[in-house]
Image (tube, coloured by chain):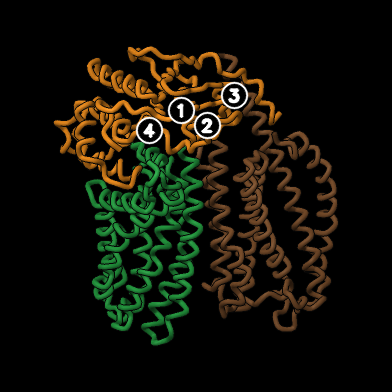
Amino acid sequence: MTNISVSSVFWSLIKRDIKLAWSQGGAAGMTLGFFLIAVTLFPLGIGPEASTLARIGPGTIWVISLLACLLSLDRLFQADFEDGSLDDLAFSPLSLELIVTAKAIAHWIATILPVILISPLLAALLNMPNLGYKMLILSLLIGTPALSFVGSIGAALTVALRRGGVLLTLLVLPLYIPTLIFGVGAVEAAISLTDPFPHLALTGAVSMISLIISPLASAAAIRLALE
Amino acid sequence: MMNKIKKIQSNYPRLVFEAANLGVKRGGRHVFGGISLALTNRTLLYLHGANGTGKSTLLRTLSGRLGPATGNISLQIDTEDAILNDNLMVLDHLNGLKNTFTLLEHCNYFVRIINGTPPEPQKVMHSLEVLKLHHLATQPIKYFSSGQRRRAALLKFLLIDRPIWLMDEPTVGVDAENRKTLAMMLEQHIKKGGAAIVATHDDIGLKGEILSLDHYTPKQKDMGYWS
Amino acid sequence: MHIFANPARFVRLANKILPWAIGVLALCLPYGLYLAIVASPPDYQQGDSVRIMYIHVPSAWMAMFTYMVMASASLAAIVWRHPLALIAGKAAAPIGATFTALALITGALWGKPMWGTYWVWDGRLTSVLILFFLYLGYMAIWQAMDDEETAGRAASILALVGVVNLPIIKFSVDWWNTLHQPASVIRLDGPTIHADLLGPLLWMAVAMKAYFIIVFLWRMKLEINKRKLAVLQMSVVNAHG
């Protein structure tokens, strides 16, 4: 019992969560579907003029990824909370801070990464200028971890609530605003041939800060729920 | 980490699990107060008491998930302070099972999340046989009956070797024959030098000490903080 | 257990502070308003619309100050589990939300004649809007959970996370080029604002702080009474088995 490797427990938990996210009842497939459908609504609602679509493209994709992330977050801890496996996790050698970190990472890999991977396809549907593609993917890669991590705080705070989804939205969306501003800023800078790096750096900074704060806050909230 | 249930009667090191003057508040009301108990090797303690006297709450407190309002909990192994989390195995009301996993997958992930390494296959098979679940090993848990689920939840005690077992209503939904299995598991565990606390309404069929929570419901006189 | 402040002692203290705070408010608010609306000169560029500043700026200060009160109370509630700290946070939140809303609304009214628009999406306005949402979120958590203590501690976690927003608000005008003017009162090299404007501003600031103290203490007393009532109700329920 003495030489338990914390890192292998950590990776096991990530693997387990990814598997669950992609199995029946998991949120990953649905999130991807939501992302596809919601983005295609924009040309239909706003009109198919190429120049308008090109103008709103980066912002639309960022906003919809944000909403897609939000949609999948309410089950981040709740599924485990409801069937009792969160209690079992509390007896693993990982601290709760590491447990929520592992779950946020798994959420990002299982749910957000696929969204990022198909985003160029949707950017093409929105007629986004060629200059923006690389930066769109890059900014999403750098910025979206903040969405999973900050979102984990909201998911942890609402874990015991039966209809926590709405409250989760209210809590988390305001905290997403910085990531959205800087992420979209980077893509638009790339399109307008100015320097996207400052925006990208700020996007990364938000991700780093959320990486530090979120595990502490989420773990405290989970502890509250497990009482 | 040899398989031990039948062959080797390895003894646990000397342990003292103590709680002194425990009092717990929930939702602003005192659930119980002034509970003291001590477990050593080969102690089997039953928690009795009417509904609402706080059996589950006491188990949550003893397992370190609910902070007591008064009193403290300590665990000593070989006269040294030991970490509670590494020496407990807890069964709650919830079974901690994932519908989409097969029973084997459940065992696999459960052990990996506690130990970091996959379980030894013969140990898994042995545990499944003890609880008469071996013919269900490759079936998804969603098809299980509630009795089968409860038995599957008991697997954790056989898969991971921990000296102190806490069980909350382990017999709920379990038929007479499988109660015998449960009794046998507990008997083996106690014989090996383990300790267990079992909250139950039923007669398990094993001799043990009894703590009745009926006498610890506090008179609500110490609510005076606000008045 | 809670030697430093039990509710009875707190109420006695609050009752001593309240008359003084009411006195300060009764003195400062009329005088501050008189200076702001009548006595102070109109701005040579902005004309009379500069007078909105005397509400806008102190409200914005109070919005941040109240958040700091709420966050400190939250920290105390989580670290020391102090029941009065939970109540303090709960009492402060609606006041802070109101000041934030006041700052945003007066800012919009001031922005229309100055910038030609009610609202711009710059760093300062956006971060203050986020502050407003944080207050709402904090109150929403209190609302959503049945158990007062759990609700309070959960809300406290959010309040502490939101502290990141405070430096962003403070420095947003320096970090981003925006329409909103940079700090002119609280800065390291002394205020750059003209003394004629500074006077009424400070009177209004003191008045608003007094107002905060009054409402804050009233709300805390109210919450304490609510809990006393809950204890009584619980004892009735218990007495009837």
Query: Which percent across, then down, holds residue B194?
Result: 39, 25
**In this rendering, do the residues under marks 4 and 1 share a single chain?**
yes
Kindly identify which residue carries mark 3.
B21
Name the secondary structure under disc 2.
loop
Quarter of the N terminus of chain C within the rendering = top right
Q: Nearer the viewer, mark 3 or mark 2?
A: 2
Mark 4 against mark 3, which lies toward the viewer? 4
**Residue at mark 2:** B79
Mark 4 crowd level (few <14, some 14–19, many ≥20, 10 Å Cα): many
Where residue A225 sits in the image (x, y, percent)? 47, 40
Q: Which residue is found at the position 25% from the left and 15% from the top?
A: B176
Residue at figure coordinates x 68%, y 59% from the top left: C65
Chain C as rendered: colour: brown
Q: Nearer the viewer, mark 1 or mark 3?
A: 1
- Of the two numbered discs 4 and 1 in the rendering, the one whose residue sits closer to the viewer: 1
**Residues under labels 2 and 1: Cα distance?**
8 Å
Q: Nearer the viewer, residue C28 or B121?
A: B121
Precedes in sequence: disc 2 or disc 1: 1
| Side of B144 where A147 appears, left or right | right
